[in-house]
Amino acid sequence: MSSLKVYAIPNCNTVKKALDWLKAHKVSYVFHDYKKLGITATLLQQWSKQVGWESLLNKKGATWRQLDPKVQASITTQKAAIALMMEKTSIIKRPLIEKDSLIIALGFDEAEYKKALK
């Protein structure tokens, strides 16, 4: 049986909701903490191919809002976005749930989780 991998940071409220949901539904997973373990450009490139780098970049969060407007304006390509996501991992939309190297969920949406994890 393949295991799920949850990529996130533990102190995020959205991540806490997602993990609570997974536990309540007895879904086993491996947790990858961006803050402790970082992220590779290769993995970000693979994810970008699946969902687009724009989807990976959380422009609604505090990390994005705290960036200098010139930096925000400079993020117009996958290469620039990946460099930023590697530098500031908390700017990656979370949680990202992967199964067999495929993203099955990005963020927390209970209906989406039910569908993807039944």
Image (cartoon, rainbow, N blue to C red):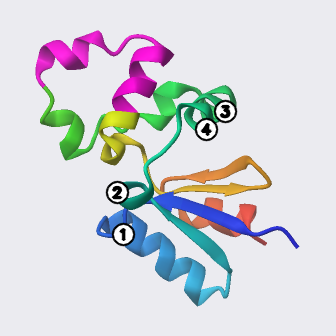
In front: mark 2 or mark 3?
A: 2
Give the spatial CA distance, label 4 vs label 2: 16 Å
Front-most of 45 and 93?
45
Furthest residue in direction right, as rendered: 1
- Disc 3 from disc 1: Cα separation: 23 Å
User: Callout 3: 10 Å neighbours few (<14), some, many (20+)?
Assistant: some
Earlier along the polypeptide chain: callout 3 or callout 1? 1
Residue 10 image label: 1
Upstream in sequence: badge 2 or badge 3 = 2
Q: CB of mark 3 within 8 Å of CB of mark 4?
A: yes
For marks 1 and 2, give the one nearer the viewer. 2
Image quadrant assignment for residue 85: top left
Circles 3 and 1 in contact, beta carbons < 8 Å: no
Q: Are marks 1 and 2 in contact (CB under 8 Å)?
A: yes
Q: Measuring from the top left, give residue 111's x and y in whole percent.
A: 61, 64
Circle 1 SS class: loop
Residue range in magenta is 68-85
In the displayed structure image, the side of residue 55 where residue 1 appears, left or right: right
Tag 3 secondary structure: helix
Residue identifier under label 3: 46
Q: CA distance from mark 1 to mark 2?
A: 9 Å
Looking at the rendered structure, the kind of residue marked 4 is Leu
Residue at 29% x, 69% y is 11
Q: Which residue is mark 4?
A: 43
Q: Nearer the viewer, residue 7 or 93?
A: 7
Q: Which of 77 and 41 lies nearest the eye of the viewer?
A: 41
Asked whether the beta carbons under mark 2 and mark 3 sit within 8 Å of each other, the answer is no
